[in-house]
């Protein structure tokens, strides 16, 4: 999942970005509202952590603009981060379109939990634990298993599996994976997606376990359940 952290306190932005990257998120940063709107215009973020009080374009206006003209027609989830803690401030933030509101100072663990909660707000994906077939991903504890076997995944492989698990059965293009699992520093002209998908595929299926990740020629990749008819049922290859 890809997150944009926006705050005019550069040290706070850096600290939040480091913490969220350790949890497997792809993180971009911005230090003012104008930069945030520019980045949101070309990147379909899954969530934006947005400071309310900033010089120039403040968080309220950023949120209003994102709701009025959502990038690619889909508005990202917005978590307001602010030192303004009155009831009126919270109501105003929520009324302009924020999905949640967290008052500074806050514990990073609470921020992380709120982010997980917001990212689960998709139809059918309501729990902290995602399950597809015999694969289970615990997003809170950062654990993944298949059957009784623990999966030893890197942070990027875990993030990639979490994204596939959130969109089971969908054919997901390489460009979409770059948008949601990698950050702005990723080189789109490298084979990083293909290589990471390949290592994840090998870790998901060992010995006689049924393959779960399909490559759909010319389109992308898909996570399937073994009961879906097996590999190649629709012309896809691995």
Image: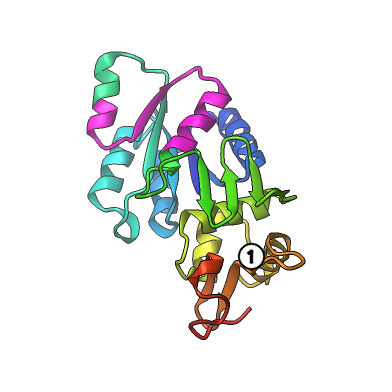
Which residues are drawn in magenta? 92-117
Magenta-span inclusion, residue 101: yes
Which residue is at 46% across, 66% downward? 169
Sort mark 1 into few (<14), some (14-19) or many (20+) by Cα contacts within 10 Å. few
Taking the view exactly as shown, the residue that stands out farthest to the top is 86
Helix, strand or loop for disc 1 = loop
Q: Is residue 230 above or below residue 196?
A: below
Residue 177 spot, x, y in % from top left: 54, 63
Q: Is residue 116 above or below residue 154?
A: above
Taking the view exactly as shown, the residue that stands out farthest to the bottom is 235
Magenta-span inclusion, residue 114: yes
- State the residue position of label 1: 187
Q: Nearer the viewer, residue 182 or 160?
A: 160
Residue 154 spot, x, y in % from top left: 72, 50
Can residue 6 be seen here? The reply is no
Which residue is at 58% across, 33% downward? 16
Which residue is at 38% across, 56% downward? 41
Residue 23 spot, x, y in % from top left: 63, 40
Which residue is at 49% across, 37% downward? 116
Q: Quadrant of residue 186?
A: bottom right
Can residue 67 be seen here? The reply is yes
Q: Quadrant of residue 143?
A: top right
């Amino acid at each position: 999942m890809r997150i944009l952290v926006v705050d005019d306190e550069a040290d706070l932005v850096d600290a939040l970005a480091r913490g969220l990257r350790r949890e497997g998120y792809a993180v971009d940063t911005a230090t003012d509202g104008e930069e945030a709107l520019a980045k949101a215009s070309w990147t379909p973020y899954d969530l934006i952590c947005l400071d309310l009080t900033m010089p120039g374009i403040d968080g309220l206006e950023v949120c209003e603009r994102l709701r009025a003209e959502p990038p690619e027609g889909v508005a990202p989830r917005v978590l307001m981060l602010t030192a303004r803690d009155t009831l009126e401030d919270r109501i105003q933030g929520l009324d302009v379109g924020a999905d949640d509101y967290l008052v500074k100072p806050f514990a990073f663990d609470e921020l992380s939990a709120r982010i997980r909660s917001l990212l689960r707000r998709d139809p059918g994906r309501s729990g902290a634990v995602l399950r597809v077939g015999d694969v289970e991903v615990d997003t809170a504890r950062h654990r993944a298993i298949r059957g009784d076997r623990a999966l030893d995944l890197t942070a990027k492989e875990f993030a990639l599996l979490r994204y596939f698990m959130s969109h089971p059965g969908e054919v997901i293009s390489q460009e979409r994976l770059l948008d949601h699992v990698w950050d702005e520093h990723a080189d789109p002209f490298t084979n990083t997606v293909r290589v990471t998908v390949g290592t994840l595929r090998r870790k998901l299926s060992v010995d006689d376990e049924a393959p779960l990740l399909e490559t759909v020629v010319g389109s992308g990749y898909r996570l399937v359940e073994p009961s879906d008819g097996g590999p190649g049922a629709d012309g896809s290859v691995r």
